[in-house]
Amino acid sequence: MASENEGMANPSPKLPPVIPPVPPPVVESSLPDVRPPPLVADLVPLAEGRLHPFTLLLTVGQALRSFLIPLLIVLFLGRRTEGAVFFWIALMMGLSLTYSLIRYFTFSYRVTANELITTQGLLGRLERKIPLSRVQDVRIEQSLLQRLLGVVELQIETAGGKGVEANLSVLSITEADRLRTLILAQSGRSPENISAAPTASNSEGIPISQNVLCRLTMGDLVRAGLTSNYMASAFVVLLVIWQKLDDWLPESVYAQLARIMEQSVHQASNNGHSFSWLMALGIGLMLLLVGLVFSVVGSVTLFYGFTLSRVGEDLRRSYGLFTRRSSSLPRRRIQVLRIDEPWLRRLLGLATLRADTAGSAAGDDNEEKTGHDVLLPIARREVIPPLLPELLPALSEEQETEWRKVSPCGIRRGFVKGTWALLALSAVICLVGQSWRGLLAMALLPAVYYLNVQAYLHLGYRLGDNFFWSRQGWLSRKTWIVPLRNAQAIIVHQSPLDRWHKVAGIRVDTAGQTNTGGAPHLLNVPAKEAVELARLLARKAATLRYRW
Amino acid sequence: MTTTLDHEEAPLRRLSPQVIRLWRLNQALSSAFWIGGTAIACLVLAWNRVIPLPLAVLLFGAVLTLRLFLFFWHPRRAYENWGYRLDDKVLEIHFGIWWKTIQLLPLSRLQHVDLHAGPIERAMGLATLTLHTAGTHDAILVIPGLDATEAARLRDELVAKGGDDGV
């Protein structure tokens, strides 16, 4: 296995070498065409096999690990009931092991021209057939332990159901890669993809596809960590640690701390400083610093060596310091693309790219932990526009169209809403504080107005031949790109207040919305324009072919 | 937005007027429950002097007015605001009295169509059409209160027009 001598310092992806995808028969190529002729031969397996024998080792390890804690508890606590509990634990472990053994020995898979078929079960047999044309995402994951053993996990995602539809755990690296190449080549067997070029791999077998689109450096990852929202989770971790420490630390430590504090307060007051402010500031800064360290560490371990490349028609992401992940997403599966610029990143000129497929698991909060929710975790803003045609090829043929603004009545409506909120705030402060000072809150009115003007200026949409664009946000900005061939329905709605202002809201519904939130809700579009826009969108969508 | 949509002028097709009766019947059933329930609750509360009698009368009056309003006024207005329009590529559904909505469905996105009629609907010769897309928020579009034969015809037309774009 490649990673054994390379160690973890090498940012190049440790995942298996790329075997050139099977070229479609129309393309003249020196590579062997392993695809059988259609019809009867569609049933002949192109690949078949069983899981790697290390599966056994790993499942035994897993069983041991999950029973380790109960065992330890019994060892430390139990005296009288020891024998019985040992018996039960041994029984459970035996059952779990037997189950794993049966699963391993009965599990087999095969890939035919159109389907991936997995079979398992001794008494009740389960055979699952996944049509290759429905495959949304092929992932290869490799935990630290699996890396030591030189095996990987292959996960197949389709549009149906939640999460992963087929999990081949574990396979040898070469087998996993062979399957991935085969599945992706077969799944993309439509006329549009015939030009998909096979990829080259260099002598060392490290995948160098023809198009590395983006590679993140250590600096990028540190920047990503510093500007990410891991901060909140880091604080939570700290809080938990402190709570744990609180139980362990003897009272004397607190007494000691109190004495030190008292002394410094004394000193500080002698110097004429306000001590409590300093202390609070110091603690705040410390927390911030530790939080930042946590986020940077989190970002680096998750996205270490991130490479986004295009292998034929598939977008491949490989990343991870300990657990290496690789995900191959056929680019025609992208339903919505979103460019995110949260305020901190926007200030620094950075952006994040998110994409949704119809297979994006709804409600799967693992997406964030595994990094599957972002297509590109971080990049300089100017890197993104040239990258877009690589992700959505039709963008390169798109005519440049102007951004259109919605009705400026949005400023007034936003301002009125803000005024009411401020009035309520003032009233609360006046009542609670029993003074007129609450009215000072009204001094924020100009700021509210300014914010609404900026929000109006940065809100807009753009309709091209094949794409619907929209963007919103001044401090934090989001830009959505919806390929019209993926628009499922267009909704125009109008509240009584909207009708008063002669405006309406418009929404484009798409199949995948987990990571991007779907297309945005454009409010305050002049009513006539909204209906016309919706009709135009619907007609365009109807004439473009939908692709899962 | 210079494109003129020639189909724009086509009038909306209406639901079957029978649907007003259906909705009235539904309202009558739930109104009976609500009005009866409120009457009993108000009586019990006023009898036990939990709330003063005028308040109980006011409460009952409010519920009664609301239910009468929903029974007499709402079904007709809802019917007047429902409509749909089908051309060769797009189905448009309009509804809403105060909060108005227009749903536009590109026919090639249609995944499947359900035709449903409950016992009361069937007795009145009505049916409900439910359209499914692969979308998320607006994956299910509904046209209620269609004449049963018209609903079947519309379903066949939708399936025929949407059928060419298999996924």
Image: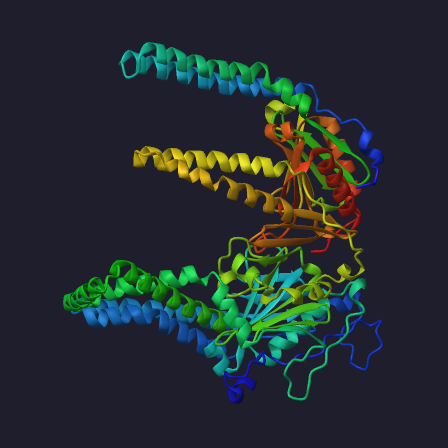
Q: Percent x, y for residue A470?
A: 67, 50
Residue at screen point 83% across, 34% down: B7
- Residue A98 appears left or right of B148: left
Q: Name the image quarter holding residue A350.
A: bottom right
Asked if residue A22 can be seen in this view, the reply is yes
Foreground pick, A436 / A369:
A436
| On screen, residue B61 above or below A260 | above
In this view, the residue in front, A70 or A372, is A372
> Number of callouts in the render?
0
Please state, as top left, top right, bottom left or bottom right, where the C terminus of chain A lies in the image.
bottom right
- Where residue B148 appears, as percent x and y from the top left, is 71, 26
Residue A520 coordinates in the image, percent (x, y): 62, 47
Tell whether B64 sits left or right of A33: left
In the image: residue A35, left or right of residue A516: right
**Residue at the (53%, 79%) spot, across then down:** A151
Q: Nearer the viewer, residue A53 or A321?
A: A321
Q: Quadrant of residue A380?
A: bottom right
Q: Residue at x 48, y 33 (%)?
A: A420
Indicate the quadrant containing the N terminus of chain A: top left, top right, bottom left or bottom right. Answer: bottom right
What color scheme is it? rainbow
Residue B125 seen in the figure: no
**Residue A337 relative to residue A83: left or right:** right
Q: Is residue A364 above or below residue A4?
A: above
Q: Nearer the viewer, residue A298 or A26?
A: A298
Return the x and y of residue B37 as percentages of the image width and height.
40, 18
